[in-house]
Amino acid sequence: MIDVVVGPEHIDALGHTNNVHYLGWLQACAWAHSAARGFDAGNMLALGYAMAVRETRMTYIGATYEGDRLRVGDWITASDGRLRAQRSFQIIRESDELTVMRAVIDYVCINLKSGRPTRMPKAFVTAYADDVRV
């Protein structure tokens, strides 16, 4: 989980958070989660594998505004232990505990040298095994 404060740079012409920033916050949350499991970008590069985004689905539930404090959380909701995994996200506004967004990102494991899909290394399967909700 990461904490975010909506700043003036996040606000669009309509006076609320521009949607492009939510994707960046999801990415930052996913990287924080991966790093907590031992797979920051450097470790993935050294291993030669990474989970690449295949599809992103974002559902906007409520608007956010400058000064809003947000909690961005994620968890692994599916993994076939071979090629694909799925991460779900929830963004909550602290002031009223309102969920302002839900998102799902599907990933595929790739070999960083070839850029091609490949079987997940055992280290990936093990690192995320206890996150998967059945």
Image (cartoon, rainbow, N blue to C red):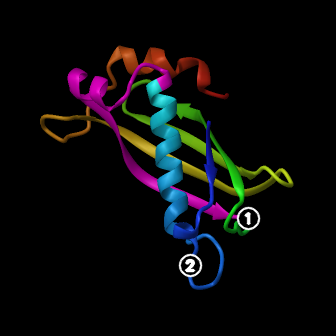
Instruction: Give the left or right position of residue 124, taking residue 64 as reference.
Output: left
**Label 1, residues with CA under 10 Å away: few <14, some 14-19, many ≥20:** few
108 up-or-down from 124: above or below:
below
Q: Which residue is mark 2?
A: 12
Q: Residue at x 24, y 21 (%)?
A: 47
Discs 1/2, front = 2
* Depth check, front residue: 63 or 119: 63
42 up-or-down from 126: above or below:
below
Mark 1 and mark 2 lie on one chain; the one further toward the N terminus is 2
- Amino acid on which the number 1 mark rests in the picture: Ile
Q: Residue at x 53, y 49 (%)?
A: 26
Which corner quadrant holds the C terminus?
A: top right
Q: Residue at x 36, y 14 (%)?
A: 122
Instruction: Give the left or right position of residue 10, taking residue 70 as reference.
Output: left
Instruction: Give the left or right position of residue 124, taking residue 67 as reference.
Output: left
- Residue reaching furthest to the right: 96
Q: Percent position (x, y) of residue 62?
A: 75, 66
Q: Which residue is mark 1?
A: 61
Q: Percent position (x, y) of residue 20?
A: 49, 67
Instruction: Give the left or right position of residue 40, taking residue 16 as reference.
Output: left
Q: Is residue 68 magenta?
A: no
